[in-house]
Structure formats: structure tokens, C-alpha cells
Amino acid sequence: MTHFFTSADCLDHLVAPGHPERPERLAFLLSELQSSSLWAELIHHDAREAELDVIARVHDHALLAELEAASPERDLVAFSADNHMSPGTLVAARRAVGAVLDAIDVVFATDDRRAFCAVRPPGHHAEEDAAMGFCFYNSIGIGADAALRRDDVERVAVLDFDVHHGNGTVDLFRDRPEVLVCSSFQHPHYPNRLHDVPGEHLVYSPLAAGTASDSFRQTIERDWLPALRRHDPDLILVSAGFDAHAADPLADINLDEDDYSWITELIIAKAADHANGRIVSVLEGGYDLSALARSVAAHLEALAT
Ligand SMILES: [Zn+2]
């Protein structure tokens, strides 16, 4: 069975009207999953709030203080051009981190070695000292750092198939070769922060606008499989954004649910080869409500098989 983490508090991060990273993303996803047969096949967990000192292991103290100071008692404030804060924002963001931390513990503690975190706000754009791109804390990066503190983990892989480059995760691990970061993304496109020349442990898979299934799959097999063989990770983390779906309003890549089933099965096979089957997947982007719900269902169905 697959572990499933979420929190009602993740619905309380509010944004201005018209903002794509809205609570309805998660509300609609949960209501669709609840009415499917998949729901009964999941092991349900409430995400806890991560402690600030754990978050501070990867994020700059100044950024954390700035976020606390900006957190409003009522209404909304614009923290940056694309990051809005409501009174519930930081609790939601800490629950998203807590979900990943607990999911990592549970895939090591039980024979059910796959977990999915249905959380928001997303995290993969958050850099050491910058909250950006709808992201506040880099949940997956904090998770990778926590996993590496375990005695039974020497190397971690982060596989990021969100349509946007996982610049935050790259930023956190640019000098830590024990974390392999593979990111596929539309290019050129937001966030345009490819200031690194990728090293062996940073694998970039840029995709031209209009890329569809065949070319996406060939790119992933060409770039990610040799890197995973070389890295031999003890745990695979997945930045699971579903905004490369053809229906997504924020990008121009033409994947569908079958592609998300395909990449999930590929990740399961690689986790079996290297990581004792251990996978923790975390929701990142995906902004068409129906496409997001169908894509997550495809991902979860593959994980639950
Ligand atoms: Zn995205």
C-alpha cells in the first residue's frame, strides 16, 4: 500500500483572485480522490508541522525571519511578485515540509515503501535565501537533507518532472554531490535561473515548447537513467509537478496522464534497482484542476500497484 499525507491546513494558504496556485487545486484533488476506489487503498496520515530549526538547516535565517515578520494577522500581503501570504500560509508551508519528513521516516520504518504528499504551497523554487515561484520552504530539499542525516542513507536522488526548472533544489545542493537532482523543464521559461553549469549530480533536461510524449520519454531515458545508475541512491524523492500536462495553463508541454503513469513506473523500477523500493513523492505544480486530479490519480495508481 502507499502512504498518503495531506493536511486541511494546506487549504488555508490563501491567494489573491486569479492566482493559479489556489486552494481549489488541493480541494478538488482531494474530493476527486475521495470518490475513487484508490482512496481505500491508501494509508492515510495527517501531515504535521515541521519545526523551524529543521527548516533552518537549508534556508537562510534572514529569509525565515523575513517570512515570519511578513506573515499577516488578517487579509493578504504580497511577499513578492508571485508569493502572496495569508494568516495560514506559513502553517500550510510547515505542514508541507512535515509531510515530507514523516513520509521519509515511514518508508524506512515500514514495508510499504512508497509515499505521496498531497500538499501546498509547493517548494521546489524556494532557494536558500529566496521564497519565489509560489514556494516558501523547499519541502523536498529539507527532506533530502533530513534523509542524509540518517545512518542508512548516503545518497539521495531528487527527480523533478514539474514543467518548471527546480532551481531551488539545485541551489540547495549545488555543492553537495550526495544529492542527485534531475530536472526536466520547459526552456526557455520561468524561472530562467540556469546560472549553473550542471555537474555530474545536477542533470538538466530542457524541453522545447510543444514537446510531447515521445520526445519527453526519450529525453528522460537518455538523461536520467545513466545518472541514476551512477548515483545509486538509497532513497528517491520526486518533485511531482503536473503542469507539463497539455491542458495546463502555465506552460506549453503536451504530456497526458499516460506519461505520468509511464514516468511513475520508471521511477518505481529504478527505486527497486537502487533504493530498496523507497519513493517519497511530493506535489509541486499543476494548475488545471481536472488535469491535475487525473494526473495525480494516474501517479497514485502506479504507486499503489
Ligand atoms: Zn511548475
Image (cartoon, rainbow, N blue to C red):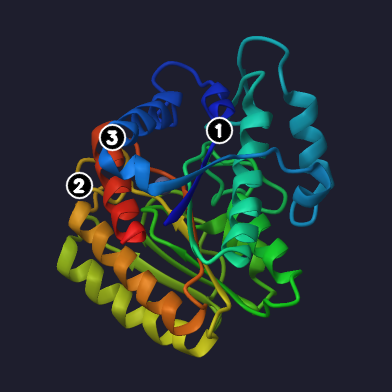
Label 1, secondary structure: give it. loop
> Is disc 2 in contact with disc 3, using a CB cutoff of under 8 Å?
no
Q: Is residue 199 above or below residue 214?
A: below
Q: What label does residue 7 carry, if any?
A: 1
Q: Amino acid at mark 1?
A: Ser
Q: What label does residue 99 carry, if any?
A: none
Is residue 165 shown to the viewer in this render? no
Question: x and y percent of residue 189 in the render?
Answer: 38, 52
Q: Which residue is mark 3?
A: 288
Is residue 142 shown to the viewer in this render? yes
Question: x and y percent of residue 99 in the render?
Answer: 60, 46
Per the model, the C-alpha gap separating discs 2 and 3 is: 10 Å
Crowding around mark 2 (Cα neighbors within 10 Å: few <14, some 14 to 19, many 20+) is many
| The N terminus - image quarter | bottom left
Question: x and y percent of residue 227 in the render?
Answer: 45, 83
Q: Is residue 108 above or below residue 33?
A: below
Q: Which residue is mark 2?
A: 246
Query: Is label 2's Cβ within 8 Å of ligand 1?
Result: no
